[in-house]
Amino acid sequence: MTEKNDNQNHNPTKGILIGVLVILAIIFAFILGVKFGRKEFSYRYPPFMHPMMRPPKEGFVPGRFRGHGLVGVVDSVGKESFVVKNRWGELVTVLVDKNTQYKVDGKSSSFSDIKKGKTVMVLGEPKEKELAVKAEIIRIF
């Protein structure tokens, strides 16, 4: 009866330590992947891939707007512009011209429907010199 059973020799802390080390190694690999990973690689394609088959590298509004959009509440209205307060509280000037399209409930509208307090979605092109957005399409809610 001097022989010890295998179950009596088992040290549970050794298994726990190995498990913790494996988890730490996985977390470390994940952090390295995020820090030095393939962020830029996602937009690189093999040389044999035709450009027409590549997905766009655009923002939330694809096509001619190249991801430039603005959503907010109208703060003030001028003659050919209005100011929108976005969700971060920033005031953004929106410039309009004769080519700007207006939509209310899917139907054509006009600049006169833009009133203080209305929610709008503006698609257009940023104008850095004027610190504004030149609107191409405005949807009024």
Image: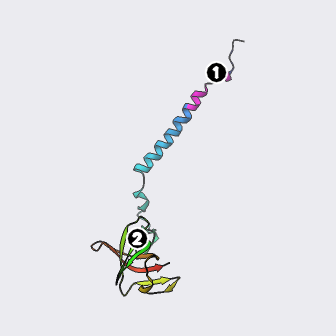
Residue at horizontal 58 percent and vertical 27 percent from the top: 13
What secondary structure is found at the residue carrying circle 1? helix
Marks 2/1 in contact by CB < 8 Å: the verdict is no
Question: What amino acid is at disc 2?
Answer: Lys
As rendered, which of 5 and 127 lies closer to the eye? 127
Residue 48, given in percent of the width and then of the height, sits at 43, 65
Residue 82, given in percent of the width and then of the height, sits at 37, 78
Residue at horizontal 49 percent and vertical 39 percent from the top: 25
N-terminal label among 2 and 1: 1
Q: Residues within 10 Å of mark 1 (few under 14, many from 20)?
A: few
Taking 139 as reference, is 79 left or right?
A: left
- Relative to 96, say whether 129 is above or below: above
As rendered, which of 136 and 48 lies closer to the eye? 136
Residue 69, given in percent of the width and then of the height, sits at 42, 72
| Residue 23 visible somewhere in the drawing | yes
Question: What amino acid is at disc 1?
Answer: Asn
Q: Which residues are magenta?
A: 7-16
Numbered tag placed on residue 85 in the rendering: 2
What secondary structure is found at the residue carrying circle 2? strand
| Total tally of numbered discs in the picture | 2
| Residue 68 visible somewhere in the drawing | no
Q: Which residue is mark 1?
A: 9
Furthest residue in direction right, as rendered: 1
- Relative to 58, say whether 99 is above or below: below
Q: Residues within 10 Å of mark 2 (few under 14, many from 20)?
A: many
Furthest residue in direction left, as rendered: 129
Residue 99, given in percent of the width and then of the height, sits at 38, 86
For residue 78, what is the image quadrant? Answer: bottom left
Q: CA distance from mark 2 to mark 1?
A: 70 Å
